[in-house]
Image: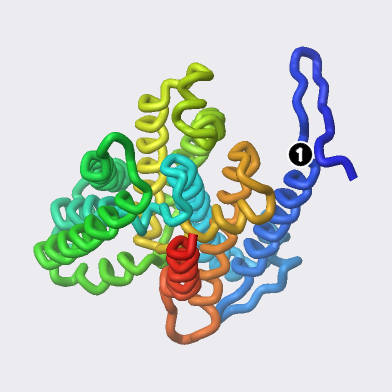
């Protein structure tokens, strides 16, 4: 079978990666199947065909209320968060050419968490409601992640960025951000402590349509920008000297890509908490399936990230009833052993 299929339009021609197209199509169908399954699973089970009918305005009023008001918002937030975290991880791994790089391991997720917890501590009243619009929450998370990214880049720089040094400094900054998160959690209203603690682990519990209307457009815009910028990652994969020789502005592109990864991380953390290891796992899975070309790696990573969080939320919400386990528990349970495995491989290289 041919690997590439030439596509010619009026003023545009390109090569279509057939294998990647098939894999992306299969992952899209898998995500839709998980979407329908998750919308129907819970204390009230609703069949897949009824769910599809409800999406088109049919079905019983009570079933429509359960699906549209409680389940759909958290599923959509989970999808957006998975897309953002996975895309951020893919960008980071390409940026520093290090398979260990991911937003949570090098401190970006921790920085975003500090920004969110500080926001909640400063702008919550005695009735546990925000005194400012929730639409400012992603900006607060982005600023927290951006500060950590700047510190990380400064401390790791010595005639270039050493991958191992970056990871080690990132681990140190992660510990610092966890301490600061705990401090601001204590400073905030006492009734928020338990909620924030669950949120830090990573959960889409309590998501509503206001959250969806905020995170969805931000996610779409950031992913479009990331896809436009993705050719810079392909060039940087060839090495700094080659990138400079072909006319790439290496330092400027690195800064822009770092800001993009930070924005994606901040957006996810603002609404889904500190879900860990998605930014590590999804790009690795995608790379094994389609290779390292970021034109197909980035969208496939985003799809796999969405699948991971939706699946983790589904398991946590339905397998342990009446308890509800945060999605971050399951991503960490899978991601932590895989991270140890990667460290072991790096040692033997």
From this viewpoint, which residue is outermost toward the left? 187
Render colour scheme: rainbow
Taking depth in this image into account, of 193 and 328 the one nearest to the observer is 328
Count of number-bearing discs: 1
User: Badge 1, how many Cα within 10 Å: few under 14, some, many 20+?
Assistant: some
Res 43 → quadrant: bottom right
As helix, strand or loop, the secondary structure at mark 1 comes to strand
Question: Where is residue 148 drawn, in percent x and y?
Answer: 24, 46
Question: Where is residue 167 drawn, in percent x and y?
Answer: 33, 54
Q: Does residue 89 show up? A: yes
Where's the N terminus, which quadrant? top right
Residue 190 in the figure: left or right of residue 226 = left
Q: Does residue 56 show up? A: no
Question: Where is residue 20 drawn, in percent x and y?
Answer: 73, 46
In the image, residue 197 sits, relative to residue 181, either above or below, namely below
Residue 228 in the figure: left or right of residue 214 = right
From this viewpoint, which residue is outermost toward the top? 11
From this viewpoint, which residue is outermost toward the right? 1
Res 293 → quadrant: top right
Taking depth in this image into account, of 342 and 69 the one nearest to the observer is 342
Residue 230 in the figure: left or right of residue 138 = right
Residue name at image x 63 percent, y 71 percent: 40
In the image, residue 309 sits, relative to residue 245, either above or below, namely below
Residue name at image x 65 percent, y 47 percent: 291
Question: Where is residue 17 drawn, in percent x and y?
Answer: 76, 39
Residue name at image x 36 percent, y 43 percent: 262
Residue 216 in the figure: left or right of residue 59 = left
* Residue at image mark 1: 17
In the image, residue 149 sits, relative to residue 129, either above or below, namely above
Taking depth in this image into account, of 302 and 196 the one nearest to the observer is 302
Residue name at image x 52 percent, y 37 percent: 237
């Amino acid at each position: 079978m041919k690997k590439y299929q030439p596509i010619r339009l009026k003023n545009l021609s390109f090569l279509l990666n057939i294998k990647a197209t098939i894999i992306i199509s299969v992952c899209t169908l898998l995500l839709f199947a998980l979407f329908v399954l998750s919308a129907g699973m819970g204390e009230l089970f609703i069949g897949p065909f009824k769910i599809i009918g409800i999406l088109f305005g049919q079905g019983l009023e009570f079933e429509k209320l359960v699906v549209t008001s409680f389940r759909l918002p958290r599923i959509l937030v989970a999808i957006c968060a998975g897309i953002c975290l996975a895309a951020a991880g893919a960008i980071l791994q390409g940026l520093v050419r290090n398979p260990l790089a991911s937003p949570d391991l090098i401190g970006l997720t921790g920085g975003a968490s500090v920004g969110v917890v500080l926001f909640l501590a400063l702008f919550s009243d005695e009735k546990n409601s925000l005194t400012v619009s929730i639409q400012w929450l992603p900006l607060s998370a982005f600023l927290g992640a951006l500060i950590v990214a700047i510190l990380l880049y400064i401390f790791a720089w010595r005639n270039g960025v050493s991958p191992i040094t970056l990871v080690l400094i990132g681990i140190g900054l992660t510990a610092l951000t966890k301490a600061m998160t705990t401090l601001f959690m204590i400073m905030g209203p006492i009734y928020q402590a338990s909620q924030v603690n669950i949120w830090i682990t990573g959960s889409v519990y309590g998501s509503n349509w206001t959250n969806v209307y905020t995170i969805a457009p931000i996610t779409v815009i950031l992913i479009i920008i990331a896809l436009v910028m993705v050719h810079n990652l392909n060039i940087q994969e060839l090495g700094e000297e080659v990138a400079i020789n072909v006319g790439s502005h290496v330092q400027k592109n690195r800064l822009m890509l770092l800001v993009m990864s930070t924005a994606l991380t901040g957006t996810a953390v603002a609404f889904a908490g500190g879900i860990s290891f998605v930014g590590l796992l999804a790009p690795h899975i995608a790379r094994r399936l389609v290779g390292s070309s970021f034109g197909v790696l980035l969208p496939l990573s985003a799809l796999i990230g969405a699948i991971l969080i939706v699946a983790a939320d589904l398991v946590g919400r339905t397998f342990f009833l009446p308890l509800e386990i945060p999605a971050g528990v399951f991503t960490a349970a899978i991601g932590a052993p895989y991270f140890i495995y990667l460290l072991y491989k790096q040692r033997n290289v």
